[in-house]
Image (tube, helix red, strand yellow):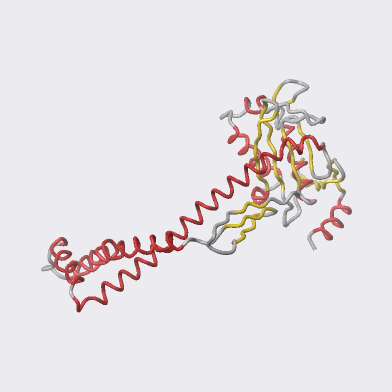
Amino acid sequence: MTNLQITYKTNAGPDRRFSFGHFTMALSPFKLPFIATYILVGAVVGVLVIHPLNLVVVWWELSRFSETAPNVLEFLSARLWLILLPRHLDVAIAYTFVGAIVGLAFGVFTRNYLRTTEAYKSLRDEQTTQIPAIMNQGENERVEFKSSLRWDMKEDRINRGLEKVIAKTIAGFFNAEGGYLLVGVDDDGKALGLDKDLSTLKSPDLDAFERTVNDIVSKYLGGDLCPYIHTVFARVDSSDVAMIIIRPTPRAAYLDENRSSAFYVRSGNSTRQLDVREALSYAKSRWN
């Protein structure tokens, strides 16, 4: 499978790399101004927010055991000003330190989230641009074309039996070395589009299509295998095409059919079912 690398570089130092399956991303270290800003804001929050909240807890504890406890506003007013006195400097430092740690942690989490989201978006765009090239290469051991997800092109009607065909192909890729399943493409690599399939969904959009793919995997192969597929879309010749990116799974994928389990594996440019003896031998070598 093609390896993609998304790199974000700054002058702050060497890149940090994060791996997502077969894909690698390099993220640069955080800049000092970013860290200092969140530490400063956190320190202020520690003194102006965390300290008063802690005092409210103290007042609540006192009011439970004393009938003469002062009003909460009076209690806060009397206690908050004490932090300005030199003898209470240690209290101010403590809340400043706690706030700074909270601010730094929040800042690191926020930056990681934003950069990871940006990296995923860039990775998705990279994968999308691959679709026309993969279509031109034709079917092989890592690539399979399907005209539709659930729409029968010959009978011009919905045929849910086709969903099992999709599941069989995905299972074959799961049990082999992964690959690409393109939907909305005929055997010759011509874009047919997803309009027919989309018309069968409650919400006729690409997000619903992606959810349907995950539902098929969950229904026939197991919900724990859904994280090993990723669906992207591209506009090719004025038609939408879906590409299901399939990674090898850490366990054997069995297709549930007719109250039994079938084992499929990718062989050449087709998906082949193995009998019990072949499946056991293959699984032993594949997941030893």
Query: Is residue 278 left or right of 218 when viewed as pictured?
Result: right
Viewer-closest of 29 and 50: 29
Instruction: Determine the residue located farthest toward the bottom in the rendered image.
Output: 87
Would you identify the image quadrant in which residue 52 lies? bottom left
Image position, residue 24 (x, y; %): 66, 55
Residue sitting farthest toward the left = 68
In the displayed structure, would residue 23 be above or below residue 170? below
Occupied quadrant, residue 126:
top right
* Residue 128 on image: x %, y %: 66, 39
Where is 188 relative to 1, above or below? above
25 with respect to 161 (left or right): left
Q: Residue at x 38, y 60 (%)?
A: 37
On the picture, is 276 further left or further right than 149? right
Give the residue furthest to the top.
156
Image: 71 above or below 171? below
Residue at 75% x, 37% y: name it: 133
x and y, in percent, of residue 148 in the image: 72, 30
The answer to which quarter of the image holds residue 65 is bottom left
On the image, the x and y values in percent for residue 275 come to: 87, 49
Side of 3 where 104 appears, left or right: left
Residue at x 46%, y 55% (from the top left corner): 110
Farthest residue, direction front = 11
Question: What quarter of the picture does the C terminus occupy?
Answer: bottom right
Task: Decide which of 149, 242 is in the foreground and name it.
Answer: 242
Looking at the image, which residue is at 83% across and 44% down?
141
**Total numbered badges shown on the rendered structure:** 0
